[in-house]
Every structure is written in structure tokens, then in C-alpha cells.
Amino acid sequence: VGDVLTSGLLVGSTLTAMFLGHWYLNTPTMQLSPLRRLVILMGVAVGLRAIVSGVGLGLEMADFTHSATVAWFVGLRWLSGIGAVALLVVMTWQTLKIPNTQSATGILYVGVICCFLGELTSQLLSVETHFPL
């Protein structure tokens, strides 16, 4: 249950922040507080996702009998879906301090791609593993 909820929260908050960022390109006089709140929600979501996936990874490593290919996919999942998204949250937050919503939207777009890549890799791994990675 935690796997599905945190995955949905991460993908949903990232997409929503990117869509709202695009709206700022049409209406640049809007207040930045809604976008900042969504970026904070993204940070919370990536943190929760890291906890759920980290617990799953720890449980899976106790009996890791998978091929090297699975290990590569686990690395891809963690680098793109957790690490890169967390870094992009920080970059977006710093960009909004300037404030530059166009650049922040571009960073969020990359965040959506990394988020999709990480979550799709996680779904692929769920076929081979017992716990969320």
C-alpha cells in the first residue's frame, strides 16, 4: 500500500508542479506561493518514496539472489527516480528564489522525465522482487 501511495504522490506532485509552472508562463503576475507549496510537496513525496523504497531495498538485500541486470536496474531506479528528483527539487526551489518561473518550469520538466523513468523502472523491478525498490 505504501508503495502505491508514495509512487502516486511523487508522480502526481511532480506533474502538477510542472503544469502549474507552465501556467506561470501565461500569467507571470501570479503569486509564487502555490508553486512553492507544490515544490515542498515534491520534496516530501521524494523523501517518503525514498523511505518506502529504502525499506524494500533493505529487505530485498537480505536475500538478494538476482542477476547483475537487476542490480543495474536498481541503480537506475535510485539514481533517476530518487536521487535526481531530489536534486531537481532543490534546484527548482533555488530557482524560485530568484524568481524565475520559466527556468523552474524547465527543471520541473526534467523532474517529470526522471520521475517517470524511476517509477517505470520500479514497476519493472516489481516483477522480479518481493519488495518495492
Image (tube, grey):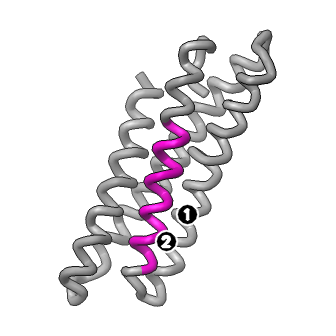
Quadrant where the image shows the C terminus: top right
* Residue 105 forms part of the magenta stretch: yes
Q: Position of residue 120 (x, y in %)?
A: 49, 33
Q: Seen from this angle, which residue lies furthest front? A: 69
Residue in the foreground of this view, choosing between 3 and 78? 78
Is residue 67 positioned above or below 115 on the image? above
**68 to the left or right of 94:** right
Locate residue 4: give its quadrant: top left
| Mark 1: amino acid | Leu
Q: Position of residue 124 (x, y in %)?
A: 54, 23
Is residue 71 positioned above or below 97 on the image? above
Q: Secondary structure at mark 1?
A: helix
Q: CA distance from mark 2 to mark 1?
A: 6 Å
| Mark 2: amino acid | Thr
Q: Position of residue 131 (x, y in %)?
A: 59, 17
Q: Are marks 2 and 1 in contact (CB under 8 Å)?
A: yes
- Residue designated by label 2: 92
At 49% from the left edge and 71% from the top edge, which residue is drawn?
Answer: 92
Is residue 21 positioned above or below 83 on the image? below
Which range of residues does the magenta coloring cover? 103-119
Q: Secondary structure at mark 2?
A: helix
- Residue designated by label 1: 88
Disc 2 residue crowd, few under 14, some 14–19, many 20+, Cα 10 Å: many
**115 to the left or right of 72:** left
